[in-house]
Amino acid sequence: TSNNKIVIIGKDSTIPDSVEILGFELFKGSLIKEITLSKNIKDIGFETFCDCKLLKKVTFLGDSIAHIRPSAFANCISLKEINIPKGVEQLGEQAFDNCYRLEKVNIPSTVKVIGNKCFRNVSKVDFVLPPNLESIGEKAFAKCYGIKNVYIPKTLEKIGSHAFSGCSKTLESIEVDPLNKVYSSKNNCNCLSQKRRQSSVLRYGRDLWGRHGCYRSEV
Protein backbone atom coordinates (compact mmCIF):
# COMPACT_ATOMS: atom_id res chain seq x y z
CA THR A 1 0.00 0.00 0.00
CA SER A 2 1.02 3.63 -0.41
CA ASN A 3 1.77 5.85 2.62
CA ASN A 4 -1.63 7.49 2.64
CA LYS A 5 -3.68 4.32 2.98
CA ILE A 6 -4.90 2.50 6.07
CA VAL A 7 -3.09 -0.78 6.48
CA ILE A 8 -5.35 -3.70 7.42
CA ILE A 9 -3.79 -7.03 8.29
CA GLY A 10 -6.43 -9.58 9.15
CA LYS A 11 -8.55 -7.93 11.80
CA ASP A 12 -5.89 -5.46 12.96
CA SER A 13 -5.45 -1.98 11.52
CA THR A 14 -2.74 0.66 11.53
CA ILE A 15 -3.36 4.29 10.61
CA PRO A 16 -0.36 5.80 8.76
CA ASP A 17 1.28 9.06 9.80
CA SER A 18 -0.08 10.90 6.77
CA VAL A 19 -3.68 10.63 8.03
CA GLU A 20 -4.91 13.45 10.30
CA ILE A 21 -8.69 12.94 10.40
CA LEU A 22 -10.71 9.75 10.74
CA GLY A 23 -13.98 10.35 8.94
CA PHE A 24 -17.64 9.63 9.56
CA GLU A 25 -18.41 5.91 10.08
CA LEU A 26 -14.98 4.93 8.75
CA PHE A 27 -14.82 1.62 10.62
CA LYS A 28 -18.43 1.41 11.78
CA GLY A 29 -19.56 -2.16 12.29
CA SER A 30 -16.25 -3.63 11.09
CA LEU A 31 -14.64 -6.77 12.53
CA ILE A 32 -11.34 -5.18 13.59
CA LYS A 33 -9.94 -6.32 16.92
CA GLU A 34 -7.08 -3.87 17.35
CA ILE A 35 -6.38 -0.37 16.03
CA THR A 36 -3.22 1.73 16.22
CA LEU A 37 -3.73 5.46 15.71
CA SER A 38 -0.73 7.39 14.43
CA LYS A 39 0.81 10.38 16.18
CA ASN A 40 -0.67 12.85 13.67
CA ILE A 41 -4.37 12.03 14.16
CA LYS A 42 -6.17 15.24 15.17
CA ASP A 43 -9.82 14.27 15.04
CA ILE A 44 -11.80 11.05 15.49
CA GLY A 45 -15.05 11.57 13.62
CA PHE A 46 -18.69 10.78 14.23
CA GLU A 47 -19.32 7.05 14.74
CA THR A 48 -15.84 6.20 13.45
CA PHE A 49 -15.63 2.96 15.45
CA CYS A 50 -19.29 2.66 16.41
CA ASP A 51 -20.56 -0.93 16.67
CA CYS A 52 -17.08 -2.45 16.34
CA LYS A 53 -18.10 -5.20 18.70
CA LEU A 54 -14.86 -7.17 18.43
CA LEU A 55 -12.57 -4.19 19.07
CA LYS A 56 -10.49 -4.96 22.15
CA LYS A 57 -7.51 -2.62 21.98
CA VAL A 58 -6.97 0.97 20.88
CA THR A 59 -3.41 2.33 20.86
CA PHE A 60 -2.74 6.06 20.59
CA LEU A 61 0.80 6.91 19.45
CA GLY A 62 0.55 10.68 19.95
CA ASP A 63 -1.12 13.54 21.80
CA SER A 64 -2.40 15.52 18.81
CA ILE A 65 -6.09 14.52 19.06
CA ALA A 66 -8.31 17.41 20.19
CA HIS A 67 -11.77 15.92 19.67
CA ILE A 68 -13.37 12.51 19.99
CA ARG A 69 -16.68 13.06 18.22
CA PRO A 70 -20.16 11.76 19.11
CA SER A 71 -20.60 7.98 19.16
CA ALA A 72 -16.99 7.49 18.06
CA PHE A 73 -16.63 4.28 20.11
CA ALA A 74 -20.28 3.64 21.01
CA ASN A 75 -21.22 -0.02 21.46
CA CYS A 76 -17.64 -1.25 21.35
CA ILE A 77 -18.63 -3.93 23.79
CA SER A 78 -15.29 -5.79 23.83
CA LEU A 79 -13.17 -2.81 24.89
CA LYS A 80 -11.73 -3.29 28.37
CA GLU A 81 -9.39 -0.33 28.60
CA ILE A 82 -9.10 3.08 26.98
CA ASN A 83 -6.28 5.51 27.61
CA ILE A 84 -7.55 8.80 26.19
CA PRO A 85 -4.46 10.74 25.10
CA LYS A 86 -3.40 14.01 26.62
CA GLY A 87 -4.49 16.85 24.36
CA VAL A 88 -8.11 15.77 23.93
CA GLU A 89 -10.39 18.63 25.02
CA GLN A 90 -13.85 17.35 24.12
CA LEU A 91 -15.47 13.96 24.46
CA GLY A 92 -18.55 13.98 22.27
CA GLU A 93 -22.07 12.82 22.98
CA GLN A 94 -22.24 9.04 23.44
CA ALA A 95 -18.54 8.74 22.60
CA PHE A 96 -18.19 5.59 24.74
CA ASP A 97 -21.86 4.84 25.30
CA ASN A 98 -22.60 1.22 26.22
CA CYS A 99 -18.96 0.12 26.29
CA TYR A 100 -19.98 -1.93 29.29
CA ARG A 101 -16.89 -4.16 29.45
CA LEU A 102 -14.58 -1.22 30.05
CA GLU A 103 -12.67 -1.69 33.30
CA LYS A 104 -10.17 1.14 33.06
CA VAL A 105 -10.62 4.62 31.58
CA ASN A 106 -8.05 7.38 31.81
CA ILE A 107 -9.45 10.88 31.23
CA PRO A 108 -6.55 13.32 30.82
CA SER A 109 -6.32 16.73 32.48
CA THR A 110 -6.86 18.44 29.11
CA VAL A 111 -10.51 17.35 28.83
CA LYS A 112 -12.92 20.26 29.36
CA VAL A 113 -16.19 18.88 28.02
CA ILE A 114 -17.82 15.48 28.54
CA GLY A 115 -20.87 15.19 26.30
CA ASN A 116 -24.35 13.80 26.87
CA LYS A 117 -24.43 10.03 27.58
CA CYS A 118 -20.68 9.91 26.97
CA PHE A 119 -19.97 7.05 29.37
CA ARG A 120 -23.49 5.79 29.93
CA ASN A 121 -23.61 2.16 31.05
CA VAL A 122 -19.85 1.94 31.61
CA SER A 123 -20.58 0.25 34.88
CA LYS A 124 -17.21 -1.12 36.06
CA VAL A 125 -15.12 2.07 36.21
CA ASP A 126 -14.62 4.35 39.20
CA PHE A 127 -14.19 7.52 37.16
CA VAL A 128 -11.96 10.40 38.20
CA LEU A 129 -13.06 13.75 36.79
CA PRO A 130 -10.22 15.73 35.21
CA PRO A 131 -9.08 18.88 37.05
CA ASN A 132 -9.90 21.30 34.21
CA LEU A 133 -13.37 19.97 33.41
CA GLU A 134 -15.96 22.67 32.62
CA SER A 135 -19.08 20.79 31.54
CA ILE A 136 -20.73 17.40 32.09
CA GLY A 137 -23.62 16.55 29.77
CA GLU A 138 -26.98 14.95 30.47
CA LYS A 139 -26.73 11.29 31.53
CA ALA A 140 -22.98 11.42 30.92
CA PHE A 141 -22.33 8.88 33.69
CA ALA A 142 -25.78 7.29 33.93
CA LYS A 143 -25.68 3.67 35.12
CA CYS A 144 -21.98 3.96 35.96
CA TYR A 145 -22.29 1.77 39.02
CA GLY A 146 -18.53 1.63 39.55
CA ILE A 147 -18.39 5.24 40.70
CA LYS A 148 -17.66 5.36 44.43
CA ASN A 149 -16.40 8.90 44.92
CA VAL A 150 -17.05 12.10 42.99
CA TYR A 151 -14.76 15.11 43.27
CA ILE A 152 -16.05 18.21 41.50
CA PRO A 153 -13.13 20.37 40.31
CA LYS A 154 -13.08 24.12 40.73
CA THR A 155 -13.49 24.70 36.99
CA LEU A 156 -16.78 22.81 36.58
CA GLU A 157 -19.62 25.17 35.67
CA LYS A 158 -22.34 22.91 34.26
CA ILE A 159 -23.74 19.49 35.17
CA GLY A 160 -26.54 18.22 32.95
CA SER A 161 -29.70 16.60 34.25
CA HIS A 162 -29.45 12.95 35.33
CA ALA A 163 -25.69 13.15 34.83
CA PHE A 164 -25.12 10.44 37.44
CA SER A 165 -28.50 8.71 37.20
CA GLY A 166 -28.49 5.33 38.92
CA CYS A 167 -25.20 5.93 40.76
CA SER A 168 -26.67 6.81 44.15
CA LYS A 169 -26.76 3.17 45.28
CA THR A 170 -22.99 2.77 45.09
CA LEU A 171 -21.84 6.35 45.67
CA GLU A 172 -19.89 6.73 48.91
CA SER A 173 -18.96 10.40 48.86
CA ILE A 174 -19.19 13.60 46.88
CA GLU A 175 -16.94 16.58 47.39
CA VAL A 176 -16.66 19.93 45.63
CA ASP A 177 -13.47 21.92 45.39
CA PRO A 178 -13.90 24.89 47.76
CA LEU A 179 -12.88 27.27 44.98
CA ASN A 180 -15.74 26.19 42.70
CA LYS A 181 -18.02 29.19 42.09
CA VAL A 182 -21.11 27.24 41.01
CA TYR A 183 -21.41 24.20 43.27
CA SER A 184 -20.82 23.17 46.86
CA SER A 185 -21.25 19.93 48.78
CA LYS A 186 -22.12 18.61 52.22
CA ASN A 187 -20.01 16.01 53.95
CA ASN A 188 -21.15 12.39 54.04
CA CYS A 189 -24.25 12.98 51.93
CA ASN A 190 -24.98 12.19 48.30
CA CYS A 191 -25.86 15.78 47.55
CA LEU A 192 -24.68 18.71 45.54
CA SER A 193 -25.63 22.34 46.07
CA GLN A 194 -25.86 24.84 43.26
CA LYS A 195 -25.00 28.33 44.41
CA ARG A 196 -27.33 31.13 43.35
CA ARG A 197 -26.14 34.51 44.50
CA GLN A 198 -26.55 34.47 48.29
CA SER A 199 -28.60 31.28 48.38
CA SER A 200 -28.15 27.70 47.29
CA VAL A 201 -30.40 25.03 45.88
CA LEU A 202 -29.54 21.39 46.43
CA ARG A 203 -29.40 19.58 43.11
CA TYR A 204 -29.55 15.91 43.79
CA GLY A 205 -32.08 13.15 43.86
CA ARG A 206 -34.01 12.93 40.61
CA ASP A 207 -32.15 15.79 38.98
CA LEU A 208 -28.65 14.28 39.19
CA TRP A 209 -28.88 10.79 40.62
CA GLY A 210 -32.18 9.56 39.22
CA ARG A 211 -35.27 8.34 41.00
CA HIS A 212 -33.36 6.41 43.68
CA GLY A 213 -31.81 9.50 45.28
CA CYS A 214 -33.41 11.91 47.74
CA TYR A 215 -34.54 15.35 46.79
CA ARG A 216 -35.02 18.63 48.55
CA SER A 217 -34.13 22.28 48.12
CA GLU A 218 -33.07 24.97 50.50
CA VAL A 219 -32.75 28.71 50.16
Image: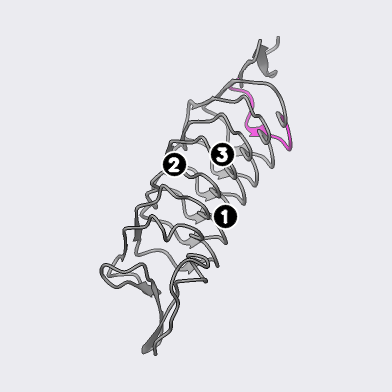
User: In the rendered image, which residue does mark 2 sit on?
Assistant: 124
Of callouts 1 and 3, which one flags the residue occurring earlier in the amino acid sequence?
3
Q: Nearer the viewer, residue 57 or 169?
A: 169
Q: Nearer the viewer, residue 174 or 177?
A: 174
User: In the rendered image, which residue does mark 1 sit on?
Assistant: 115
Q: In this rendering, which labeled residue sits more in front, label 1 or label 2?
A: 2
Amino acid bearing label 3: Cys
Residue 185 placed where, x, y %?
32, 71
Residue 213 placed where, x, y %?
45, 68
Q: CA distance from mark 1 to mark 2?
A: 19 Å
Q: CA distance from mark 2 to mark 3?
A: 10 Å
The reply to whether the C-beta atoms of the residues labelled 2 and 3 are less than 8 Å apart is: no
Magenta residue span: 16-26
Q: CA distance from mark 1 to mark 3?
A: 15 Å
Name the residue: 38% across, 71% down: 192
Amino acid bearing label 2: Lys
Answer with the quarter of the image where residue 83 lies: top left
Of callouts 2 and 3, which one flags the residue occurring earlier in the amino acid sequence?
3
Element carrying mark 1: loop
Name the residue: 41% across, 47% down: 146
Q: In this rendering, which labeled residue sits more in front, label 2 or label 3?
A: 2
The reply to whether the C-beta atoms of the residues labelled 1 and 2 are less than 8 Å apart is: no
Residue 3 can be seen in this image: no
User: In the rendered image, which residue does mark 3 sit on?
Assistant: 99
Magenta run includes residue 20: yes
Element carrying mark 3: loop
